[in-house]
Image (cartoon, rainbow, N blue to C red):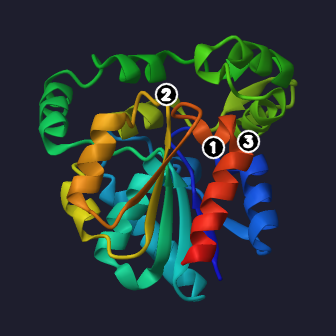
Amino acid sequence: MQLLFSHANGYPPDAYRVLLASLSENLGVPVSTHAHRPLVSDAPPPTFLTWQTYASDLIERIEGDEQGPVWLIGHSMGAASALLAAARRPDLFAGIVALDPVLVPTRIWFWARVFSFFKPDAVPIVKRALARPHVFESRDAAFDFYRGKRVFAEVSDTVLMDYVSAGHVAQPDGSVTLRHSGAWEACIYRSVPRMTGSLKAVACPLLIVAGESSDVLNGERLSWAKATNPTVEIQSLSGGHLLPLEAPEACAKAAADFIRRH
């Protein structure tokens, strides 16, 4: 059995160290990780870039491993890009566990895309990405900055330090710089895809694990996902959109139980 993890926008794979260790312990096999384009490309980020690009990168990665179909565990855009890839290449996926995936119904997607096209930097989440600090005087300074942010309120100190270590590069003077730039983060937010066709086409076992207080995947969107593809299994856990960082052991258990059943 091959396990591959696909990370969220702005959260490098090693930020999920506790989740990945718990997955490996539960299933008795190692978990490989896939780094999306913003972490490996030297090219400047465009204003828009279709998420099918990240799906193509995933397909290329899995094909390159030459180890047969994978169980893909993904978070947020990492899960959504896996759904796009599985719709195109079902032979490469044994199943998918989508941790609070980005799933936007067509009606909402259309108007969001129109607004982003005319005012690409006006959406609040894009403005925040572009304004985020990229340099801290030390790793501890970065930790203290993020510790005070509401989005990380339910993330343990251990996991938050994993994020700081994974998401920043140490410089000779002791400072640290952000790995996944705010410009790339904004590009991804502007380019959120229409998911209806791909979600409907996914034929492999699919579990969606939703954060009960998620501001990305609410009850209405879960109902839409189930209506779009009735074979989808849905489970909710206490937490928000950062569920895999807030409750890594619970996410790992849910994923492992589903994988074992299939």
203 displayed left or right of 41:
left
Residue displayed at 57% across by 67% down: 258
Q: In the image, is residue 197 above or below residue 153?
A: below
Inter-mark Cα distance, 3 to 2: 26 Å
Residue nearest the viewer, comparing 202 with 7? 202
Foreground disc of the pair 1, 3: 1
Q: Are marks 1 and 2 in contact (CB under 8 Å)?
A: no
Inter-mark Cα distance, 1 to 3: 15 Å
Q: Which mark is residue 115?
A: none
The secondary element bearing badge 3 is classed as helix
Q: Which mark is residue 213?
A: 2
Residue displayed at 33% across by 67% down: 231
Quadrant of the image occupied by residue 71: bottom right
Mark 2: amino acid: Ser
Residue 224, how many percent across, how many down?
Answer: 24, 47
Q: Are marks 1 and 3 in contact (CB under 8 Å)?
A: no
From this viewpoint, is residue 20 visible?
yes
Few, some or many C-alpha atoms within 10 Å of disc 2 (few <14, some 14-19, many ≥20)? Answer: some
Foreground disc of the pair 1, 2: 2
Residue farthest top in this picture:
148
Q: In the image, is residue 92 above or below residue 46?
A: below
Q: Which mark is residue 244?
A: 1
Mark 1: amino acid: Pro
Mark 3: amino acid: Ala
The secondary element bearing badge 2 is classed as loop
Q: In the image, is residue 66 above or below residue 114?
A: below
From this viewpoint, is residue 191 visible?
no
Residue 102, how many percent across, how many down?
Answer: 38, 44
Q: Earlier in the sequence, mark 1 or mark 3?
A: 3
Residue displayed at 51% across by 84% down: 69
Q: Which residue is mark 3?
A: 166
Residue nearest the viewer, comparing 42 with 232? 232
